[in-house]
Amino acid sequence: MVLALSAGKIQQHISAIASGFLGDWLENRGNGLAVPMTLFVDGKPLDVRNPKLDAPGGTLCVSIHGLMELESVWDFPGQAGEHYGTRLAGAMGDTTALKLRFNSGRPIYRNGQDLASLLDQLVARWPVPVERIILLGHSMGGLMIRSACHFGSVQAHSWVGKQLECVYIGSPHDGSWLAIGAHKVAETLNRVPRDYLKVVGEVIDLRSEGIRNLSRGDVFEPGTVEQPLIPEARHYVISGLLAKTENHRVNVMFGDALVHESSVRGARREGWELSGIANFPGVDHIRLAHHPLVCGQLQEWLV
Amino acid sequence: MKGPENNVHWWLGVADLLAHGLQHGTVKLKRVHLSLADESFRVLEAIPVTRSGSRVVRVCHHSVSHLSYAAVSMAGRAIAVLAGNASSRRVVAQKYDENVNNS
């Protein structure tokens, strides 16, 4: 039984990584490695068309993971099933903590559209009236929230009209230095008149649309004019840094390992009104998804 | 990832991905191999003593390489086609079952 469980988890992680790298291609081929978008409650998949829960809350707290991750990234180390959502639910009461799993290689705007439609369906069929929605997004998950909010607002989805709170945790709104670097390296190598170097550039170019979107923080459908954060919601930003000293050279170069602090704050975006900004030096990109300090900050803002 | 049906679909997906990796990876490896070899052949070509010999060796080397890489790439393509077809049939069957169950 233990072996079967761990084999299943390994399969899920392989699917998440393959989907992150080549998710759009896998989806187009109907490949079994492509991760379908699924909501989980207490570790079990939720049927959005007919949500059945023992004690559904009037507040929904949805945690959305990042590139190549699974919903398990939210769990505190050594405490499976314990995450920001459950801690918030415990502190606030009348709250259901949900986690989303999705194919992170698809273009962010397509995942955003699907998330918006999923939330619309969920709120419409939720057993009790939904009054408040909290969306927690780690890394790419935060970009997906922005995309879903824009799409939901344009489509006049009912969930956008609820008390809506969006928390972007380590999200590269202005792009990730690693994704930008990969883009530049591929571009340079493709111009070199040596086939063996061109091949390296071509291999880097195989990356999914989701990864490409991370180089500039693209969350809208191509051709859409840049949109500010939706005014119906309150928006919070949380960033991390590798070194504990804020102005350390490592932080200036690498930020939280993958994203710079300025990118998390959306420094280049115009017309952003943020209800809260928090920075945690010494907490790296992945640990931002399950760190006690971040949990404390969320409780301070949301409870 | 539940049930034996999904597990078979998952393994077919792995086979499909690996076969595609083999097919396209072989083509890319061939290009790296031949372009690196060409660097050496260019040097030999510039030396009058080795020029004529290197031309013959280059043709033989490139011909054998083309054949070898093409054989591996074709094997990858065949596996990819088989895995892709099996996977598609399974998806169609699954959708049919879902429609029947929903109706």
Image (cartoon, coloured by chain):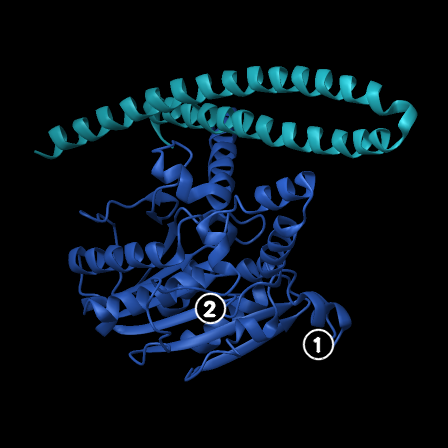
Q: What is the number of callouts on the image? A: 2
The chain identifier of the residue carrying mark 1 reads: A
Q: Amino acid at mark 2?
A: Tyr
Say which residue appears at 63% left-offset and 15% top-offset.
Answer: B68
Query: Looking at the image, which is closer to me, A116 or A27?
Result: A27
Q: Considering the numbered disc 2 on the image, is that residue within a helix, a strand or a loop? A: strand
Q: In which quadrant will I find the C terminus of chain A?
A: bottom left
For label 1, the residue is A246
Q: Which residue is mark 2?
A: A168
Horizontal side, residue A141 vs residue A253: left or right = left
Location of residue A148 by image quarter: bottom left
Q: Amino acid at mark 1?
A: Glu
Colour assigned to chain A in the rendering is blue
Q: Residue at x 29, y 58 (%)?
A: A113
**Crowding near the residue tagged with mark 2, few <14, some 14–19, many ≥20 C-alpha atoms within 10 Å:** many
Work out whether mark 1 precedes mark 2 in sequence or the reverse, and give the earlier one: 2
Residue B49 % position (x, y)? 92, 24
Left or right for B84, reference A153? right
- Point out the residue furthest to the left here: B103
Instruction: Name the colour assigned to chain B in the rendering.
Output: cyan
Q: Nearer the viewer, residue A96 or A167?
A: A167
Q: Residues within 10 Å of mark 1 (few under 14, many from 20)?
A: some
Would residue A303 be seen by someone viewing this image from the given angle?
no
Q: Please determine whether, in this image, residue B92 is positioned above or below residue A222.
A: above
Residue A286: x and y, percent?
Answer: 59, 56
Local SS, label 1: loop
